[in-house]
Image: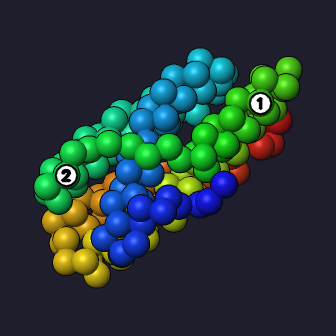
Amino acid sequence: MALFTKDIQTMDDLYTHALQDIYYAEQQIVKALPKMIGKTTSPALKTAFESHLEESKTHVSRLEQAFELLGQKAKGATCPAIDGIIKEANEVAGDIGDPKVLDAALAFAAQGVEHYEITRYGSLIAWSRELNHPEVAALLQQTLAEEKAADQKLTDLAENGLNKAA
């Protein structure tokens, strides 16, 4: 299986594909977070997941704005990477009986998602600037800042309680 389709010939094609990839990813994250919220027993982790669910819905809206600014219809391209990260999170969570260990595993899984998003948004911001789409770069920069903050929140929760409790 090729990483990208044959339709990608130019940097503009790659840029559009990457936007479609992260749009799909954000939509999958919005679907996955309620399940994670339901599994956690940590009130602090639950609050963090609930907050990030709302942010993720905003990220979807921002991406729709980005597509609009580019004169394109918002659509997703299946992202095997995020599908795999979410599948792994579900499998790990399904195998853990101890709720404290489960909370640590959920934070771990969520950080995998955040790190994926951080890399994608970082590249998309650079490409937006290179392709002279400063308005899109500004939208994506807001999202990147929120993704980094969510990652830091998860690190703080893990290091200041979840890991020790597990």
The foreground one among 143 and 13 is 13
The residue under label 1 is 91
Q: Residue furthest front?
A: 6
Three-letter code, disc 1: Glu
The residue under label 2 is 72
Q: Position of residue 94 (x, y in %)?
A: 78, 23
- Secondary structure of the residue carrying tag 1 is helix
What's the distance in space between the residues labelled 2 and 1, CA to CA?
Answer: 36 Å
The foreground one among 92 and 23 is 23
User: Residue 96 falls in which quadrant of the image?
Assistant: top right
Badge 2 or badge 1: first in the primary sequence: 2
Left or right, residue 48 beside residue 166: left
The foreground one among 96 and 22 is 22
The foreground one among 138 and 44 is 138
Q: Tag 1: Cα neighbours inside 10 Å, few (<14), some, or many (≥20)?
A: few
Looking at the image, can residue 145 be seen? no
The image shows residue 80, relative to residue 33, as above or below, that is: below
Residue beneath the point at 60% across and 27% down: 36
Residue beneath the point at 50% across and 43% down: 78
Q: Position of residue 142 (x, y in %)?
A: 29, 58
Left or right, residue 72 beside residue 106: left
The image shows residue 108, relative to residue 35, as above or below, that is: below
Residue beneath the point at 38% across and 51% down: 20
Q: How did the renderer colour the structure?
A: rainbow
Q: Tell me the quarter of the image containing the C terminus.
A: top right
Left or right, residue 94 beside residue 8: right
Three-letter code, disc 2: Gln
